[in-house]
């Protein structure tokens, strides 16, 4: 799948989530997302060469902007994973 298509789908989903007004509906969607994420094994994740390069370039841009976490901040976040 092209990265631009995936980005458009993500934006569409975010817009949908922002429009949810019912707490119960949102809780169900949220629960399903968390269940799906937990069921993914690292071996299920496969990136194309272009995707890897794109991710590396994005990371480099974030580093240059100073959007980084300290080791301590990362460890705190990791406790919630």
Image: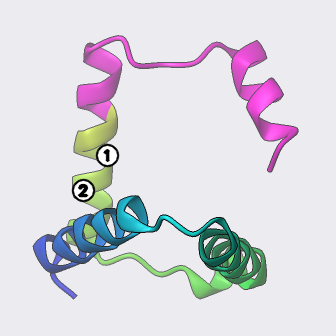
Q: Is 38 a magenta residue?
A: no
Query: Residue at 81% across / 27% down in the picture?
Result: 75
Magenta stretch in the rendered image? 60-81
Q: Disc 1 vs disc 2: Cβ atoms closer than 8 Å?
A: yes
Residue at x 30%, y 78% (from the top left corner): 48
Seen from this angle, which residue lies furthest right? 79
- The residue at the point 31 percent across, 52 percent down is 55
Q: Which residue is mark 2?
A: 53
Residue 62 drawn in magenta: yes
In the drawing, does residue 12 fall left or right of residue 76? left
For disc 1, the marked residue is: 56
Quadrant assignment, res 79: top right
Q: Check the image and report above or below for 38 versus 63.
A: below
Picture disc at residue 20: none
Quarter of the figure that contains the N terminus:
bottom left
Considering depth in this image, is 32 or 75 the residue closer to the camera?
Answer: 32
Residue 50 image offset from top left, x and y in percent: 20, 68
């Amino acid at each position: 799948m092209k990265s631009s298509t995936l980005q458009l789908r993500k934006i569409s989903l975010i817009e949908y989530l922002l429009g949810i007004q019912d707490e119960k509906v949102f809780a169900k969607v949220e629960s399903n997302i968390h269940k799906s994420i937990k069921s993914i094994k690292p071996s299920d994740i496969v990136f194309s060469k272009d995707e890897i390069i794109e991710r590396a370039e994005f990371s480099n841009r974030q580093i240059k902007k100073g959007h980084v976490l300290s080791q301590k901040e990362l460890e705190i976040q990791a406790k919630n994973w």
